[in-house]
Amino acid sequence: MIRLILIIFFNSLGFSQTLSVSVNKNKINMGDVITLNIEIKGGNDIGEIDLSGIEKNFEILNGPSEQNNYQWINGKEKKSKTLSWNIAPIRLGRLKIPALSVIVDNRKLKGNSILIQVAKTSQNQTKDVFIFVDLDKESAFLGEQVTLTYKLYKRQDINIVSIDHFVMPDFKGFWYEELYTPQRLQYNSQPVLINGLKYQVANLGQRALFPIVSESHEIPPIKVKIKIEVKNKKRKRDVFFDPFFDSFFSETKTKILTTENEIIKIKTFPIPRPEDFTGAVGDFNINANIDRDKLIVNEGITFKIEMSGTGNIGLFSLPKIIFPDFIEVFKPTESFKKDKFRNQLTGTKIWEYILIPRKSGEITIPQMKMSIFDPKINNWKSISTKPFNLQVLRDSTTTLYNSGLTKKEVELIDKDIRYINTDEYKLNKKGEMNYSFIAVIYVFSGLFIIFPVVFSYLIGYRLSSENDRRISGAFRKNIKILRNKENGNEFEIASYALYSYLKDRLSLATNNLDPNQVRIILQNKVSRSLFDKINDLLVICDEGRFSPVAYEKRNIVIDEMFKILKQIEKELK
């Protein structure tokens, strides 16, 4: 009898806790949001619910929201807890929400599985609200601007309560510039007609995309979550339900708006391609100026090149300017001022050189000539600067050009010359030794020998520190980086290997370097010929990453960087 009572008791405990899973609808269109409810009846200690099984077919938008219900029936307490999530399908077809389980009072409860039918929105079905990718062109040349605008369309009778901030996609295969990002949702004053229906349009963001050398040029889809107001059905007017109060209790509905994949086709440049084409695509003007045309040897002048227009300005480099050998040329500083009130990337870019002539006489700064491609005329154009003549005068304070010393510098040298000391010294007789002095020397010598050993024993100091090992292993480490070239872009790997090598080899604080910093670091540390090779290869790497000019050299940059690292290692030793 007691055994039967215990069986009934434990069975009653088991059936006092139940788990049920439900959704508010199981037939939806792509972009609709459904509510997933999990109800747990009975139980006090409820564990976490693992929803990873549904993420294969659905995106979890938010949740869980929690609702608790308590009832007393015939003196007995009945309680339940309902957890709710908003989820949206990520593909079409019959999607399954698997049987979910949860631990309740140390018992595992398992719910039921649910099938959801997801259909594609019919083309004939009127959309109340949607987003659209507006591209000003479907095909472009490398470096030619493609203007992308995300537009939100909504029917005039639809009220959007909120729109979540969305992240612009990663435009792989493009270099891009921001043209417009709204601070708040603002609709155009004039509605547009689509299939006889009026829609209000808002700009969600605009970008200027410039195709670069890549295997694909695809604009991925974006998802935007919005909440729209759902009007309550009209109720019979009475004392308690006045329509005036309906606006305070309106409901909201969540929708997921998505865009389609867009692919930009790349057009080929006309043949033949000019040798002085460095990737400039657009409509540009160029001019140059100097701050003066008469100066003294070893004085600096400013040589400024200014390019203005519309196109991929900032995505290409200038052709190499061959200055006279006796002019010292410093890396130019670059600046760009963008016109913010245009939907085309328009502005002015300035390259500012500092030139220092090391020899007197008449000097000519040569003309700089370059070719650009203008998509409007689908042909090549040539632009150039004018040459400048400089009159470099001899410095009256200069002695010899090769010595590089002025009279003022010579005057300072005498401060470094030590004159004969006229103080009296105590002299010892020949053969007589100063034993006290010798003893002091021996004592200090012994301390210098013993102290490092004692110091090493006390604090564990090692002469071969971690920094020393990093320096000695810099070459081997970055050669391995070059050999793993299949893991990425050849131009990026080559430049990264050099920057990483210099960081380890010279104990720099960071490997976040650029060609200008490399020139400063290696100045007077390597030979002039090697210095020029490093500079030229880094220019090729930058061009290969951002323009099509050096793309054909991608198969040799790794080998060239290997030779350069080997030569740097040899010269730094």
Image (cartoon, helix red, strand yellow):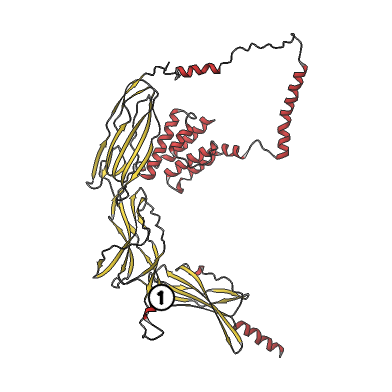
Q: How many marks?
A: 1
Q: Nearer the viewer, residue 61 or 51?
A: 61
* Whether residue 563 can be seen here: no
Q: Which residue is mark 1?
A: 248
* Whether residue 199 can be seen here: yes
Height in image: 573 above or below 278?
above
In the image, farthest residue toward the bottom: 1
Q: Secondary structure at mark 1?
A: helix
In the image, farthest residue toward the left: 377
Residue 212 placed where, x, y %?
35, 48
Question: Badge 1, how many Cα within 10 Å: few under 14, some, many 20+?
Answer: few
Residue 257 location, quadrant? bottom left
Residue plotted at (28% across, 72% down): 124
Left or right of 421? Residue 339 is left
Q: In what quadrant of the picture does the N terminus appear?
A: bottom right
Height in image: 236 above or below 260?
below
Amino acid at pointer 1: Phe
Height in image: 456 above or below 24?
above
Residue plotted at (30% across, 64% down): 201
Left or right of 355? Residue 422 is right
Residue plotted at (51% across, 69% down): 51
Residue 268 placed where, x, y %?
28, 48
In the image, farthest residue toward the top: 430
Left or right of 462? Residue 504 is left
Q: Nearer the viewer, residue 487 or 307?
A: 307
Left or right of 385? Residue 505 is right
Q: In what quadrant of the picture does the C terminus appear?
A: top right
Height in image: 273 above or below 198?
above
Residue 70 placed where, x, y %?
56, 81
Residue plotted at (49% across, 70% down): 63
Residue 484 placed where, x, y %?
48, 45
